[in-house]
Image (cartoon, rainbow, N blue to C red):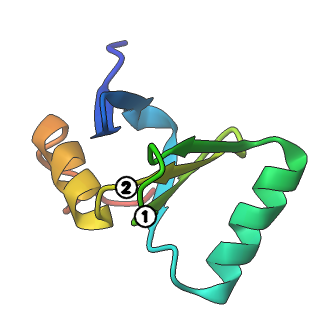
Amino acid sequence: MTLKLINIGFGNIVSASRIISIVSPDSAPIKRVVTEARERGLLIDATYGRRTRAVIVADSGHIILSAVQPETVKHRLQAREPNIENAEIE
């Protein structure tokens, strides 16, 4: 098994296989998820003090904040996994 890593900005890297979703931080439910993760100690802030533009949810329950757009992270995932857009859910 090959470990696939995705750059989420400022040299920070996340394992592609652990990502469940990449969402915008603007909605109230996502803001609550971020607040709860901070309280539980499961928040990873990779923004380097910049504005949060993407919230990455990992299968471990960790919430990762990134300063790059969700679309940018998606394109980086697609560059590693060309069929991710057309993948079928089993």
Q: What residue type is labelled 2?
A: Ala
Residue assigned mark 2: 67
Q: Is residue 6 left or right of residue 63?
A: left
Q: Residue at x 29, y 64 (%)?
A: 69
Q: Which x, y percent locates residue 14?
A: 42, 32
Q: Vertically, is 13 above or below 74?
A: above
Which residue, given by chain and number where applicable, does mark 1 sit on? 51
Q: Which residue lies furthest to the front in this view?
A: 49
Q: Residues within 10 Å of mark 1 (few under 14, many from 20)?
A: few
Taking the spot 57% from the left edge, 86% from the top edge, the residue there is 27
Left or right, 51 with reference to 7: right
The residue positioned farthest toward the top in the image shown: 1
**Does residue 3 appear to the left or right of 28 in the view shown?**
left
Q: Are marks 2 and 1 in contact (CB under 8 Å)?
A: yes
Q: Residue at x 51, y 73 (%)?
A: 25
- Taking 35 as reference, is 57 above or below it? above
Distance of mark 2 from mark 1, alpha carbons? 6 Å
Question: Which residue is the extreme one toward the right?
Answer: 40
Q: What secondary structure is found at the residue carrying circle 2?
A: loop
